[in-house]
Image: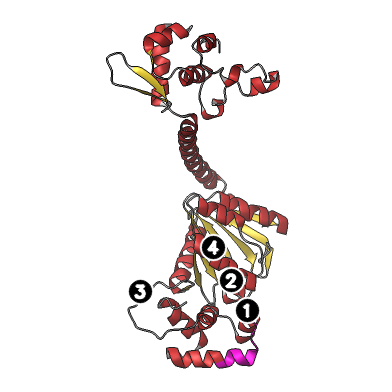
């Protein structure tokens, strides 16, 4: 680097910095001239840090001899590197500067940038909300956006989820615009970023074998799932600021995006009411009742019953015949003192038997 004389490093027997490696091509040298540029580090900051890597424990006076920068500017650069967490200083009379390991420095800088990106994203959402509110006052038709076409609905479904910062509420029921046998990769990615997912499934959704298995897998990574026999509509709500729902229950290819309005408030209340009425797919272990021990096969059967599946659907899931399923269900009803299949599943789920 021009500001810090690498030839001094060579005289002191230190390795040649990577940036001045003569074996590098001009193109790669230009690309790698400042590897920290993407993390907000200037060329001068990187150059001084590189010098310290070759001369750890250097005093200010020694750095001044290695540098072409005026002493006031050099002192400022050292303070900047210290503030960025790239160098440390000992407490001696003539302080010495020590660079932190590059891998640790990069991880720290990346985390700082990620925090800045999250703040920017939240601020952008706030500004978008202010702009939308102003537009809605002058142009009320923008409260509802019609999405026509299966491909457009699928694209908007993914966009709506990716816009979530805090939570997603969803009611999952057929028919589907997306493949119901394929996992929701956007959901899994968002859960990994800290977004909470609460999903209500209908029994006919969980009658799809792959769907039930995916619900179990998603519960392991953090999804909160419940089952409701008669959910009113397919629905997804993001941060209580936007909703996506089909305009006709039998045609997901014509849907609507609903923005902050009385209609959105109603949809939020509908979901919250359904959530309170729904049965957890995983037991909440709130009861201290002592219940009989159950086999793994019985637990699996009760899980299917809690999901509201009929005997034919249970038979498909378990590989048993319909009559065999009926006999097992009758036995479980007696064991759990339940009057209906769904009641048996609900009781078992609430007592952490499934």
User: Does the image show residue 91?
Assistant: yes
Residue carrying label 2: 212
Displayed quadrant of residue 58: top left
- Label 3 CA crowd tier, 10 Å (few <14, some 14–19, many 20+): few
Of callouts 3 and 4, the N-terminal one: 4
Q: Estimate the x, y position of residue 238 in percent, counting from the top left.
A: 52, 55
Look at 46% across and 83% down and name the residue there: 294
Residue range in magenta is: 317-327
Quarter of the image for the N terminus: give it: top right
Look at 56% across and 56% down and name the residue there: 188
Left or right, 60 with reference to 275:
left
Of callouts 1 and 4, the N-terminal one: 4
- Marks 2 and 4 sit apart, C-alpha to C-alpha, by 10 Å
User: Quick check: is 324 in the magenta stretch?
Assistant: yes
Q: Is mark 3 on a helix, strand or loop?
A: loop
For discs 3 and 1, the disc positioned in front in the rendered view: 1
Residue carrying label 4: 218
Q: Estimate the x, y position of residue 336 in percent, counting from the top left.
A: 43, 88
Residue carrying label 3: 286
Question: Are circles 3 and 4 on residues that touch, CB within 8 Å?
Answer: no
- Marks 2 and 3 sit apart, C-alpha to C-alpha, by 24 Å
Left or right, 74 with reference to 250:
left
Prevailing secondary structure of the magenta residues? helix
Of callouts 2 and 4, the N-terminal one: 2
Left or right, 187 with reference to 119:
right
- Marks 3 and 4 sit apart, C-alpha to C-alpha, by 22 Å
Question: Are circles 1 and 2 on residues that touch, CB within 8 Å?
Answer: yes
Residue carrying label 1: 317
Question: Are circles 2 and 4 on residues that touch, CB within 8 Å?
Answer: no
């Amino acid at each position: 680097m021009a500001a810090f004389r690498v030839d001094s490093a060579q005289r002191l027997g230190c390795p040649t910095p990577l940036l001045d490696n003569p074996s590098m091509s001009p193109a790669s040298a230009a690309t790698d001239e400042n590897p920290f540029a993407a993390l907000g580090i200037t060329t001068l900051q990187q150059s001084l840090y590189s010098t310290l890597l070759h001369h750890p424990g250097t005093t200010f006076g020694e750095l001044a001899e290695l540098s072409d920068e005026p002493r006031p500017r050099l002192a400022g650069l050292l303070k900047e590197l210290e503030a960025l967490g790239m160098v440390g200083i000992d407490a001696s009379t003539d302080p010495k500067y020590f660079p932190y390991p590059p891998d640790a420095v990069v991880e720290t800088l990346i985390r700082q940038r990620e925090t800045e990106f999250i703040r920017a994203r939240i601020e952008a959402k706030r500004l978008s909300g202010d702009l939308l509110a102003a537009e809605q006052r002058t142009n009320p038709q923008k409260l509802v956006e019609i999405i026509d076409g299966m491909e457009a609905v699928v694209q908007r479904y993914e966009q709506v989820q990716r816009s979530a910062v805090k939570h997603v509420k969803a009611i999952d029921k057929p028919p589907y615009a997306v493949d119901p046998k394929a996992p929701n990769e956007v959901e899994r990615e968002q859960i990994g970023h800290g977004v909470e997912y609460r999903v209500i499934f209908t029994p006919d959704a969980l009658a799809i074998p792959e769907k039930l298995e995916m619900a179990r897998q998603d519960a392991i990574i953090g999804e909160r799932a419940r089952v409701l026999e008669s959910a009113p509509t397919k629905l997804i709500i993001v941060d209580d600021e936007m909703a996506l729902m089909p305009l006709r229950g039998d045609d997901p290819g014509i849907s609507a995006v609903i923005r902050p309005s009385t209609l959105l408030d109603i949809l939020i209340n509908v979901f919250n009411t359904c959530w309170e009425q729904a049965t957890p797919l995983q037991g909440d272990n709130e009861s201290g009742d002592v219940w009989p021990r159950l086999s793994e096969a019985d637990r699996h059967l009760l899980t299917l019953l809690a999901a509201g599946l009929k005997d034919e659907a249970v038979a498909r899931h378990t590989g048993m015949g319909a009559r065999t399923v009926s006999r097992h269900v009758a036995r479980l009803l007696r064991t759990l003192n339940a009057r209906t299949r769904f009641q048996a599943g609900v009781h078992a789920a609430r007592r952490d038997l499934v």
